[in-house]
């Protein structure tokens, strides 16, 4: 393992990306590999992750896929240790895997809360646990945790997601403070709406009530989601500059600033958003 070395941006670096089979994780893997980074795509959907890795290799990049359940801390540790043993270093850890369970808090079952916390928060904690000590020993590294604008502003209709993303922001800022003199960087991604499968719930999330999928897609498209490839390119520039909190697209920064300026105003905006979404969903109807 490299000791007292220097982080590589991004050519010649090594990166692990959880949730690397689709969405933001896949886009990061492809973009980093194109910049000369060796990527490891960890995901429960290992066959899909292997397809992504094969595509990267076919394009001349370096990529491997690994089956990974982020809820299993031992599996996370094993993947990190295997990667470092094989590559001799770890420059980047993207704690990206996440799920979204959409619906009102009154509709949540305890299983919905547990699933959200296990994947979105515990999964990030496991990634930090597996990498932070190792990066301190080697003298460099960058931990990038995927939160959301829902981790900076009170976001309705996805309360489990919002809860865990607020926690991820707090975790990341506290860890950045602790890591300031260690050579280890810590950033948190807080994207607005990005065009990925999570807008439809992804494989492991979704709407609690059975709304017509085409109507849900139409409602989500009305939020003007940024293309995932564009988001990743913007984010990588900020990561290279060691930005602490990365909010993009720029329009979502306004909501963040307003919420910081006046939390009361932030809750008011959230209430209005909830009323708009509820009205849209009521027009759809749903099947029991």
Image (cartoon, rainbow, N blue to C red):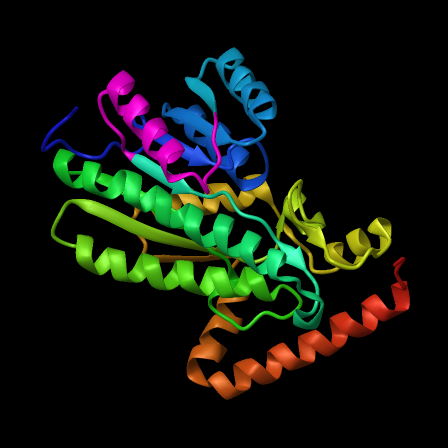
Q: Foreground: 288 or 218?
A: 288
Q: Foreground: 180 or 120?
A: 120
Looking at the image, which residue is at 54% across and 73% down? 154
Looking at the image, which residue is at 44% across and 19% down? 63
Q: Is residue 21 visible?
A: yes
Horizontal arrangement in the rendering, residue 37 relative to residue 197 (left or right): left
Magenta run includes residue 111: no
Residue sitting at the far front = 110
Horizontal arrangement in the rendering, residue 213 relative to residue 132 (left or right): right
Residue 276 position, x and y percent, is: 75, 75
Query: In this rendering, is residue 238 above or below 140?
Result: below
Residue 192 position, x and y percent, is: 56, 58
Looking at the image, which residue is at 30% across and 61% down? 173
Horizontal arrangement in the rendering, residue 181 relative to residue 69 (left or right): left
Residue 124 position, x and y percent, is: 40, 48
The secondary structure making up most of the magenta span is helix
Query: In this rendering, is residue 284 above or below 133?
Result: below
Q: Quadrant of the C terminus?
A: bottom right
Q: Quadrant of residue 135?
A: top left
Q: Quadrant of residue 183?
A: top left
Q: Foreground: 240 or 38?
A: 38
Magenta-tinted stretch: 67-91
Magenta run includes residue 86: yes
Looking at the image, which residue is at 26% across and 24% down? 84
Query: In this rendering, is residue 273 above or below 112?
Result: below
Q: Is residue 12 visible?
A: no
Counting the numbered discs, the total is 0
């Amino acid at each position: 393992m490299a000791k007292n070395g220097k982080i590589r941006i991004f050519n010649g670096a090594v990166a692990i990306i959880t949730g690397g089979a689709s969405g933001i994780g896949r886009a990061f893997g492809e973009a980093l590999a194109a910049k000369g980074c060796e990527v490891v795509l960890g995901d429960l959907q290992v066959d899909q992750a292997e397809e992504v890795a094969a595509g990267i290799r076919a394009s001349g990049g370096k990529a491997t896929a690994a089956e990974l359940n982020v809820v299993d801390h031992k599996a996370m540790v094993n993947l990190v240790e295997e990667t470092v043993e094989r590559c001799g270093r770890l420059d980047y850890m993207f704690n990206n895997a996440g799920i979204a369970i959409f619906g009102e808090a009154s509709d949540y079952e305890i299983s919905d809360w547990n699933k959200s916390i296990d994947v979105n928060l515990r999964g990030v904690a496991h990634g930090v646990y597996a990498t932070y000590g190792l990066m301190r020993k080697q003298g460099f590294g960058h931990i990038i945790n995927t939160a959301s604008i829902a981790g900076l502003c009170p976001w309705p209709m996805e309360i489990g997601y919002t809860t865990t993303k607020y926690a991820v922001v707090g975790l990341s800022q506290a860890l950045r403070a602790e890591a300031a003199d260690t050579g280890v960087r810590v950033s948190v991604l807080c994207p607005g709406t990005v065009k990925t499968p999570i807008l439809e719930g992804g494989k492991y999330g979704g709407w609690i009530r059975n709304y017509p999928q085409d109507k849900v897609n139409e409602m989500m498209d009305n939020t003007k989601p940024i293309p995932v490839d564009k988001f990743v390119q913007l984010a990588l520039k900020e990561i290279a500059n060691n930005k602490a909190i990365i909010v993009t697209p720029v329009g979502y920064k306004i909501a963040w600033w307003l919420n910081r300026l006046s939390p009361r105003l932030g809750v008011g905006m959230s209430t209005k958003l909830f009323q708009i979404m509820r009205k849209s969903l009521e027009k759809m109807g749903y099947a029991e």
